[in-house]
Amino acid sequence: MRTIETDAVIIGAGPVGLFQAFQLGLQDIRCHIVDALPHVGGQCQELYADKPIYDIPGVPVYSGAELIANLQKQVQPFQPTLHLGQLVAECKQQADGRFALSTSTATQFLSKTVFIAAGVGAFQPRPLLVEGATELEGKCVHYGQPNALDLSGKDILVMGQDADAISSALSLAQSSPAPKSVTLMHRRDVFDAPVERVQSMRDAVGSGKLHLQIGQLTAIKTNQGVLQSVTIATSTGESIDRPMHHIVAFLGISPKLGPIAQWELAMQRKQLEVNTENFSTSTRGIFAVGDINTYPGKKKLILCGFHEATLAAFGAADIVYPDRNTPLQYTTTSTALHRLLGVSGKN
């Protein structure tokens, strides 16, 4: 696989990572963004998509989803390349000062700078804690909607109680060619999803297109590495066995610091120590912004992360353009920034 050479790699596609890409763009630095989740937004999108945020300057109230959507629109002029659903596994500094990075899907980068905007860590799906499930991951056990799988004639169990779980169950039940059966299971008959989506699920159950099972998974049975059946403890105390070929689990997410802990960067209580001049870590060329960093007076607020990303971009400019004098410019008046933003000639 070819190595992607770039000026900057941002680890984390949450709000601070997206704003970091914007600030780098204002310094005429293009970047690639890597995130463990299959979509942008990080914790803001996963946990606060529908919740109000009141402390974004100039905006009385934003939902998490609205904030992410507008940050994506803001950074659009600089077209950062996204690499989603993968972790940065290794980061090694080379003799010329650049950093060689590789991801869990074997994507390779050679970058002049690295920005760690991973929040409290890379958000990863909570695993299915049933004996034998780990060996089936990616084959019969899936975290999130499975892609490019022939599910025709198969029995599928979807686990979860949120909107993603319901949407996945409905999508699978309506797919063509059709599975043999699709069952949505949660331990209680209570779902954390919009009323309309829950009603769509109940209508599908009523019409027989989808099965609803209230209970908990207690065991799985396999044959030569292939899922055969599951055992479910029902809400009435029964234990039932059901034939099953695939499990699609939406069990929430949890943050893990992951490989970053092995990169020999100065840390304090699982957070990266930075200087507040440009938010560089103990290794020149690697910056840390947002909740992943620590310094005297640190406050874990989104707007503080935006400030950190701004100064980090100036720090990167000194590395990417060592012979350039980087003046402070204002987007209100700078024709150079207007050209970068693609708004030249506009009032």
Image (cartoon, rainbow, N blue to C red):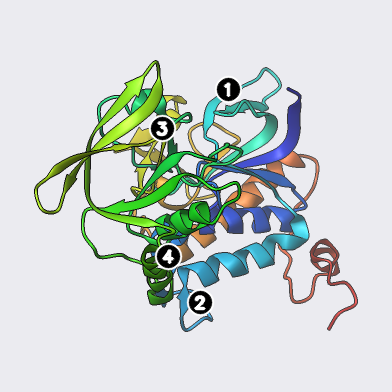
For the N terminus, give its image quadrant: top right
Q: Nearer the viewer, residue 250 or 60?
A: 250
Earlier-in-chain disc, 4 versus 3 = 4
Earlier-in-chain disc, 1 versus 4 = 1
Amino acid identity at mark 3: Gly
Q: Residues within 10 Å of mark 2 (few under 14, many from 20)?
A: few
Q: Position of residue 135 (x, y in %)?
A: 38, 22
Q: Residue at x 67, y 25 (%)?
A: 97
Q: Which residue is mark 1?
A: 92
Q: Is residue 319 visible?
A: no
Q: Residue at x 51, y 76 (%)?
A: 57
Earlier-in-chain disc, 2 versus 1 = 2
Q: Which residue is mark 2?
A: 57
Q: Which residue is mark 3?
A: 258
Mark 2 residue element: loop
Q: Which residue is mark 4?
A: 204
